[in-house]
Amino acid sequence: MILLHIDSSPLGSNSVSRHLTERVVSEWTATRPDTRVEYLDLAADAPSHLSADSLGFRVGPQAGASSEAQQRENAVSERLVAQFLRADVIVVGAPMYNFSVPSQLKAWIDRIAQAGRTFAYTEKGPIGLAGGKTVIVASSRGGIYSTNPALVGLDHQESYLQAVFRFVGITDIRFVRAEGVAMGEAARSRAIASADLAIAALLRTPANEGEAVLAA
Ligand SMILES: Cc1cc2nc3c(=O)[nH]c(=O)nc-3n(C[C@H](O)[C@H](O)[C@H](O)COP(=O)(O)O)c2cc1C
């Protein structure tokens, strides 16, 4: 089994989402020693925003020979989509930034959302081509959204990630969440402790099982 561990927070050891992904991965591998872990640190090595040079995989071959820049960008997209496709389990550290995800995580999504590789349009609409994987999102956010009806509609972070992974065909999408981490030291500690506790329950279900969307 291959587990792809992705972090996107730039905050190093102060990052809540990095703390959570590390815990998820170490608890996962402790009970599944046959797991091979691949690591992608998007804060250290993010793909660039999509550009005329990197859009080849979406718009098809362009007239004339591809330039050096296009070949380089295509190689980046290919490396990232191939890495995503070969993973059985993907653990994603996802802070909330301005109600959504950090742009480095969005840039990765832009490289793996490839027609013909991870999804396809058919006469009946889009279908996902990357099913059978388990995604575990380690979500961190300053405010509390999940239990506040006035704010829940502002969550374009977890809801966006859920939409993207579903779009590519993944049905086993799980969330572990530390929220309210900007609401004082006590609230931050409580949020992290409660997320830590939720991880064990989250990992009890084996990978790639069923249609379950489990929310911590
Ligand atoms: C640039 C930036 C934007 C943020 N935007 C939001 C936001 O829209 N809503 C929110 O609740 N928290 C927001 N936060 C707080 C982070 O979600 C919170 O600090 C989280 O723990 C960051 O993840 P990390 O600790 O893994 O870096 C923001 C933080 C930063 C640095």
Image: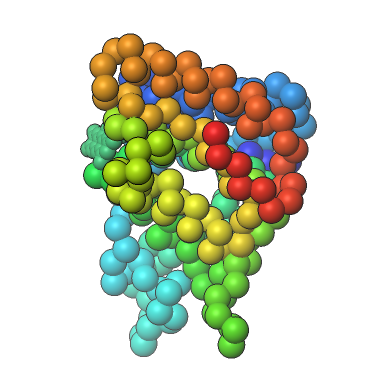
Q: How is the image coloured?
A: rainbow
**77 in relation to 33, above or below:** below
**204 in relation to 46, above or below:** above
Which quadrant of the view contains residue 48? bottom left
Q: Would residue 200 be seen by someone viewing this image from the given angle? A: yes
Where is ligand 1, by quadrant? top left
Q: Position of residue 107 (x, y in %)?
A: 36, 54
Q: Where is residue 82 in the image (x, y as percent from the top left)?
A: 58, 56
Which residue is at a point 37% across and 71% down the rendered structure image? 55
Q: Residue farthest to the top? A: 186
On-image quarter of the C terminus: top right
Which residue is at a point 41% across and 38% down the rendered structure image? 146
In this picture, residue 5 sits left or right of residue 12? right
Q: Residue farthest to the front? A: 149
Which residue is at a point 56% across and 19% down the rendered structure image? 197
**The one of 139 and 180 positioned closer to us in this rendering:** 180
Which quadrant of the view contains residue 198? top right
Q: Where is residue 80 in the image (x, y as percent from the top left)?
A: 50, 53
**The one of 24 and 112 positioned closer to us in this rendering:** 24
**The one of 211 and 65 positioned closer to us in this rendering:** 211
Which residue is at a point 50% across and 68% down the rendered structure image? 114
Q: Position of residue 81 (x, y in %)?
A: 53, 58
Which quadrant of the view contains residue 116? bottom right
